[in-house]
Amino acid sequence: MNRKDHDLDTLLRQNAERQLAKFDWEEFGRRMDRRVTTAPAWSRSWNRYDKWVALAAGIALTAGVLIFAIPEATGPGRVASVQGEAKVTMIETTRPRGTAQVSFTRAERPVRCELRILTSDKPRQESQTPARWCIVAGQGLSAEKHRNGGDASDILCLF
Amino acid sequence: MKDDGWEQSETVALVKASQTGDRAAFDRLVQLHQRRAMGLAFGILGNVHDAAEVVQEALVKAYLGLGGLSHPERFRSWLLRIVAHEAISRRRSARRHRIIMRLLAASAMERRAAEPQERGREEELHTAIERALQRLSAKEAEAIALFGLDGLSHKEVGRIMGCSAGAVRWHVHRARKKLGVLLREYLE
């Protein structure tokens, strides 16, 4: 090591020693104690298996993406994206202000109710309720236009 | 300073005890390694306040991750790696806020100029070193800080930094060269 490097190392070391000499190690210890005491216990046990948990989470995430995203991207339109949830049903009557009386089967039970008709290109949440959509195909209504321009064969109902 | 071999064997025993949930063992482990950890964080950041926060964060992470450490004899390197990583992250985020800090510092300087106050040479040197360290790259700062710690071989520094001993020498060389220029007036 040349003299210049030696002098620089000495300068850095002396500066560190001077600054750290003023450091309150007792306060540091108290703070550490508080932080370790409040460290989440679940995290400690989780960490032991973190690689496996991360792997499992990764697999689940990938599976989720494959199940939901791929049909959305490659399926034949919106019908595929809600397959399983969608119930093809009959619109019995349409009512003013964009509602329709419908009947369908849900959880193997016949359901009859009034649904608000929403255009399919405007997904939304109603009253903070998570949106769950079904496609309602109306017999004899395919040519009928909803008042805001939505086609009857292209309407979604929220339930 | 205690014998390195003795410290190593105590560390291994304490790590094993900590892994079984012995909190007192972990506290002792902290006591044993906190000064070196502070030395490293200070060496990278050049600021005691930031270094203390970084070391606390690193020690909490070490506490939470201790269960996953399969080689207790590597605790020192493992802990220093966490400290270095935290310090570099802090340095990066500090860099992002530097423009704001410069503006604040400029207004503070204006206030000081209004009431002249003699600053000690020691404080001036400390500020100059802190600023000079910020001018280094992350690798250079990490290398010179680790190199400044007692008892670390080039090989161990390389293991902590994830590079070869040759690369460590290169980063240290570059850091010294830059610091030599930036701190020229304090070296004469």
Image (cartoon, grey):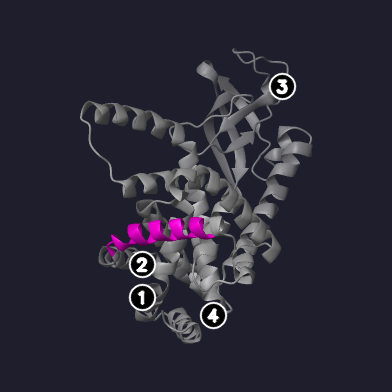
- Please tell me which residue is depicted at 62% across the width and 36% down the height of the picture: A134
In front of the other: B120 or B147: B120
Q: Can you identify the residue that label 1 sits on? A: B27
Identify residue type, mark 4: Pro
Residue B83 at x, y = what percent?
A: 49, 61
User: Chief secondary structure of the magenta span?
Assistant: helix
Sort mark 4 into few (<14), some (14-19) or many (20+) by Cα contacts within 10 Å: some
Residue B87 at x, y = what percent?
A: 48, 54
Is there a contact, CB below 8 Å, between mark 2 and mark 1?
yes
**Distance in Å between CA atoms under marks 3 and 4:** 75 Å
- Please tell me which residue is depicted at 65% across the width and 53% down the height of the picture: A61
**Distance in Å between CA atoms under marks 3 and 1:** 77 Å
Secondary structure under the numbered disc 3 in the rendered image: loop
Query: In the image, is B114 to the left or to the right of A131?
Result: left
Query: In the image, is A20 to the left or to the right of B96?
Result: left
Q: Can you identify the residue that label 2 sits on? A: A36
| Residue A157 drawn above or below residue B93 | above
The answer as to whether the residues below labels 3 and 2 share one chain is: yes
**Distance in Å between CA atoms under marks 4 and 2:** 20 Å
